[in-house]
Amino acid sequence: MKFTSKTLDPVTTLTQCAIVPVFEGGKLSSSARAINSASGGSLKALLKREDISGKHGESVLLPLIDSVKAERVLLVGCGPKGKMSEAQFNTLLGKITHLIKGKKLEKITVFFDELSVAGKDRNWQAQRVATTLALSSYHFDQFKSKRTRHKSLKQVTYASSSQAYNRGLNQALTTGLAIAKGMGVARDLGNMPGNACTPNYLASEARKLARKHPALSSRILSEKQMQDLGMGSFLSVTAGTVEPARMIVMQYQGAAKSQRPHILVGKGITFDSGGISLKPGAGMDEMKFDMCGAASVFGVLNTVLALKLPINLVCIVAAAENMPSGQATKPGDIVTSMSGQTIEVLNTDAEGRLVLCDALTYAEQFKPQSVIDIATLTGACVVALGNHAHGLYSNDDKLAGELLDCGQAVNDKAWHMPLWPEYDKQLKSNFADMANIGGRNAGSVTAACFLARFTKKYAWAHLDIAGTAWNSGGNKGATGRPVALLSEYLIRQSGKGRRGGKKTSR
Ligand code: BES
Ligand code: MN
Ligand code: ZN
């Protein structure tokens, strides 16, 4: 897919569909005005007939207008001229993707540079358009025996109102497209069934990516190697399955070797049955999505590679399957983590934290600037925040603030949750250093408190994406979140951010 910004004449532009705004009260945008005068007042006539008035959410698709080169003109109502809210802009984009879907369009042109969204600049707008339109043609049919041939968008031209804006707009479009690519990768991995997307499959994807990109190297730890490193907690999760577990380490070097890396750690439970603490049957298929944290790490890495960000990044994926069997870990078993801390496994279904804690200890050797883990960690997080925001926890308020900001900027929001000692106390065990569960109350918080015990040596944040990583019901499927948030974070860290990157000096 190609996105480019150009200054264009809306009348003579050859395109399959020109998307043109009109404002409330029948006010034409400048592109609409041009089309109107070229076509002898056809748009004004339309407004007069009240086919469209410019209100939010309205639209009319006009085929073949006299003396206008575009094959179609899609008029979209944008509300009162001036500023629209971000939410209204999102609705508008949603509406447009809905309208162009199924129209088999390959080349479209959007005249959006004359819209303005409150508090946002033109580049922000272009980036959002690129991400949304690029994802509008996402489909997942790898596993259907008959695949439909999709005609998806190939070329989007973003009409710019001045030559001087093109450079910035083009960069924003490239970023938006790279984020969509990362989200697509995350969705694809997330949507794959557990019998195809195994820990070994994720490892092979890592190797494949490293072969393709010279700046990336991969290292796959076997169970034997994890054993030698003392990862007793991680290994307790994989005890019941025949699928071998893998710790996948991918190192991207985009900056001087001396620059400390950022680290992403993904929960990669390729299927979570609960183990001996078996989950109920209804909806258990959705536990194939329990590797969406890992999928988002692969996604962000793809974005970073596409943008060639000048940062160093280490990606760690803790990949295992959680199954019951005669060899499986039992409630009450005590295991020793790589950090030396012992854990009483009171519930084998609280397995995410068990694989993550060893991955987080493993991360220490890289002397990171920041470590962010991403995990479909708790059902309790879904209860607390629903499907709208990721649960954000951090031992560093500055890092937390930056992540909250990034989520806002790219419509991939997180909400800051507490890590107070009162909650941490719930993890007390009579027999080991800690239990792996903290009781019924505040389940998402106590899970994060558990992880916090393994992240004392660096600035760390945890995203609980249990409610945001996938949709259930009719449009069941991975969302690709929080690739946008994390990409934005790394872009800002790289100093490539539009608002100027703040270099953290940790
Ligand atoms: N993968 C689940 C969390 C989950 C559940 C995510 C439902 C999305 C939807 C995790 O491994 C889990 O089973 N957590 C338990 C923890 C409990 C045993 C303390 C949970 O949330 O029920
Ligand atoms: Mn579980
Ligand atoms: Zn799980």
Image (cartoon, helix red, strand yellow):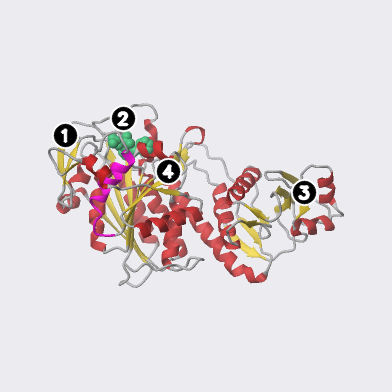
**Could you say which disc has been placed on residue 25 in the image?**
3
Kindly indicate whether the residue at mark 1 contacts the one at mark 3 (C-beta within 8 angstroms): no
Query: x, y (%) of residue 189?
Result: 41, 46
- How far separated are the C-alphas under marks 3 and 4? 40 Å
- How far separated are the C-alphas under marks 3 and 1? 69 Å
Q: Is mark 2 on a helix, strand or loop?
A: loop
* Residue carrying label 4: 469
Q: What residue type is labelled 4?
A: Ala
Crowd class of label 1 (few under 14; some 14 to 19; many from 20; radius 10 Å): some
Say whether disc 4 or disc 1 marks the residue closer to the N-terminus: 1
Kindly indicate whether the residue at mark 4 contacts the one at mark 3 (C-beta within 8 angstroms): no
* Residue carrying label 1: 332
Of labels 3 and 1, the one closer to you? 3
Q: Does mark 2 have its CB less than 8 Å from ligand 1?
A: yes
Vertical position of residue 1 compared to residue 322: above or below: below
Q: Does mark 3 have its CB less than 8 Å from ligand 1?
A: no
Kindly indicate whether the residue at mark 2 contacts the one at mark 3 (C-beta within 8 angstroms): no
Q: Is residue 67 covered in magenta? A: no
Q: Does mark 1 have its CB less than 8 Å from ligand 1?
A: no
